[in-house]
Image: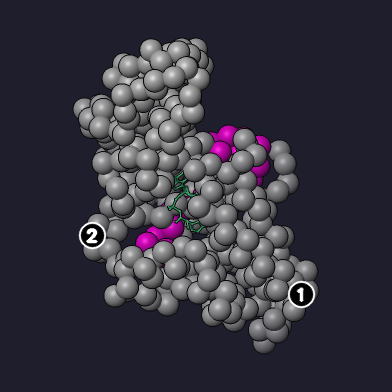
Amino acid sequence: MNQEIVVSGIRSTGNLHLGNYFGAMKNYVKMQDEYPCYFFVADYHSLTTHPEPAALKQNVYKVLAENIACGLDPEKVTLYVQSDIPEIPELYLILNMLAYKGELEKTASFKDKARSQPDNVNAGLLTYPTLMSADIMIHKGQYVPVGKDQEQHLEMARNFAQRFNHRYGETFPEPEAFNFGTQLVKIPSLDGNGKMSKSENENATIYLCDTDEQIIKKIKKAKSDQGPLTEFSEMPDYIVNLFDLMQLVSAKETVEHFKSTFNHCTIRYGDMKMQLAEDMIKFISPIREKTISIKEDTALIQKIMKAGKEKARESASKTLAEARKKIGIHFYC
Ligand code: TYM
């Protein structure tokens, strides 16, 4: 077992999709056998968009169930809910004193959200990266398995850790975004515009809870064209995306076969899509079925949450006590 501590989380804002799986979860599952791991449902982060209270609870249960259905073993990892750990918001408050308005405003995710929801540019959105840093630093996290979209947040977490260490003495490791394949992953959406996402572009995103029929329908609708007219021509982006998705779920020979038909102008995108849909269904349906059965067992989910909370608080309270002491907030000892 390696010594480096692994921390990562997923917001409870909607259904998990292929991007969450291949950007994050796949690494979680592999890392659980090699590192001490803390994985959590980021329910505080979801509050920036004010979800309905009843929906929030169900979403937290669902994300937990999906984590387990994807292969996380709550016996091996500490699996918990962010809001169960009061030490996180306390560290968040402390880190906010080391984060500057200018750098927070420059964050790409903040600028995107401020543009897309101009009536709800709240302080939680602005300080999203400090809460994320607190999530990681509360366990002295070193490796953070995430997709490419989180790269800038990790850079900020390193800055906050450095600033704390510089001001108060060496306390936190500088966390790094992690992927076993070395490159961080971005799973594209089916319409060739941007990435798969929980909330935008639902028809161009494949969710881990999609039915077989939904998967077929979405893949059939994916953007394609008449096929290449000259041999070995350059692939348009949206066709590259289809091949990228195929690479995730299909056998190597299958991908090679369709690549060769593309290169020789004999490709039939209808056939390629049917093959992709079939392989996608083989990949998704066991996760979907397992999620359904775990989610039905609320008692089991709550038991896992409680055990995770205990383990996570043990680590979090130690880190927070150390940080408070370094800052000078320790009056009774
Ligand atoms: P969230 O909930 O948006 O996404 C969860 C994980 O899935 C990855 N991901 C993707 N990877 C590749 N391609 C995509 N299309 C794609 N879409 C999503 C994300 O990179 C992420 O790893 N801020 C985080 C949650 C969070 C967190 C943390 C993560 C809160 N605190 C501390 C790590 C450490 C988020 O919104 O992820």
Q: Which residue lies furthest to the front in this view?
A: 230
Between 38 and 145, the one lying in front of the other is 145
Which residue sits at x=48%, y=24%? 233
Question: SS at mark 2?
Answer: helix
Check contact, mark 1 vs mark 2: CB within 8 A.
no
Q: Where is residue 190 in the image (x, y as percent from the top left)?
A: 34, 37
For the residue pair 123 and 184, the one nearer the viewer reads as: 184
Percent position of residue 94, x then y? 59, 78
Q: In which quarter of the image is residue 87?
A: bottom right
Q: What residue type is labelled 2?
A: Ala
How packed mark 2 is, by other alpha carbons closer than 10 Å (few <14, some 14-19, many 20 or more), is: few
Question: Could you say where residue 213 lies in the image, as x and y percent from the top left?
Answer: 21, 27
* Disc 2 C-beta below 8 A from ligand 1: no
Question: Does the magenta-highlighted stretch encompass residue 165?
Answer: no
Residue located at (44% from left, 68% from top): 111
Please give the label number shown on residue 308.
none
What mark, if any, has residue 166 been given in the picture? 1
Which residue sits at x=42%, y=73%? 124
Q: Quadrant location of residue 179? A: top right
Residue 54 is tagged as 2
Instruction: Report whether 229 appears left or right of 56.
Output: right
Vertical comparison of 325 with 237: above or below: below
**Visible in this render: residue 4?**
yes
Q: Is residue 175 above or below residue 218?
A: below
- Part of the protein shown in magenta: 27-47
Amino acid, disc 1 = His
Question: Residue drawn at (51%, 36%), measured in percent from left and top?
Answer: 26
- Name the N-terminal-most of marks 1 and 2: 2
> Where's the C terminus, which quadrant?
bottom right
Residue 289 figure quarter: top left
Is residue 318 visible from the viewing direction of this image?
Answer: no
